[in-house]
Amino acid sequence: MSGHNKWSTIKHKKEKTDAQRGKIFTKIGREIVIAVREGGPDPATNGKLRDVVAKAKAANMPGDNIMRSIKKAAGEGDAANYKEITYEGYAPGGVAIIVEIVTDNLNRTAAEVRHIFDKCGGSLGATGCVSWMFERKGVIELDNQKKLDEEELMMLALDAGAADVEVAEDEVIIYTDPADFSSVRENLEKAGCVFLSAERAMVPNNTVDITDPELAAKVERLVDWLEDYDDTQAVFHNANLPESEDEED
């Protein structure tokens, strides 16, 4: 079950500056708005909202910000009518890309996402062109700085209802069926686990090894632009990119 740590090899990681944290909090705030509108403002009775709150906590979003977002979403003052939409396409080298968007202006977003793909040498495709290469899963990353016993971690995760576990040097990646995500996350939370992230994600069934530095830089440029775009909630791809020097330090 452990060893290759697929998620860590494809997860695009970069240092979170204050500005980037602010963007992350804004994106999570939009997810809170959608969750509240779908199921109400009480996390006890709204499973989707519970999941978003857990994601917010894993991102170190202050509790006051979370409560403010919930109250704002529950009130009548927020006129924004957010919609969720997914775009699919290719990065240079044939790398598959999925972009999950929350927007209040579909026409504007479609044009801007297409522009980003074109500008970075990629191509925006039709719905379904790459999603068949991915599988929707719950993905929970736990802090493993204390080097917890691998067998104990696996048993804890599997007892909580996880489908698969990967143990890396400083983190543990737990995969769940999407329907089991909430219960697994809550069971791990009760067990005192520290989350680095917790989300439902599109995990590639197979990855594309990108070894050429120039090509890797082009793929990373497109992923960076898409991640930095204001309406983007998440970007998933199937590239196995070489670690940068910053990530190795």
Image (tube, rainbow, N blue to C red):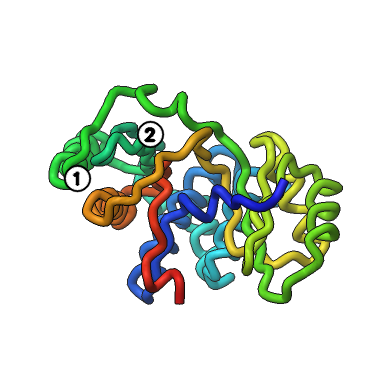
Name the disc covering residue 170, or none. Answer: none
| Residue 226 seen by the camera | no
Residue 107 appears in which quarter of the rendering? top left
Label 2 Cα crowd, 10 Å radius (few <14 / some 14-19 / many 20+): some
Measured as percent of width and height from the top left, residue 195 is found at 65, 63
Residue 239 appears in which quarter of the rendering? top left
Question: Which one is closest to the eye, mark 1 or mark 2?
Answer: 1
Secondary structure, mark 1, is: helix
Secondary structure, mark 2, is: strand
Measured as percent of width and height from the top left, residue 172 is found at 67, 59
**What amino acid does circle 1 point to?**
Ile
Label 1 Cα crowd, 10 Å radius (few <14 / some 14-19 / many 20+): some
**What amino acid does circle 2 point to?**
Thr
The residue where tag 1 is placed is 116
**Picture residue at 42% right of the left edge, 56% below the top:** 12
The residue where tag 2 is placed is 86
Labels 1 and 2 touching (C-beta < 8 A):
no
**Picture residue at 40% right of the left edge, 40% below the top:** 208
Q: Is residue 156 left or right of residue 242?
A: right
Measured as percent of width and height from the top left, residue 204 is found at 49, 37
Tell me which numbered mark, 1 or 2, is placed earlier along the sequence.
Answer: 2
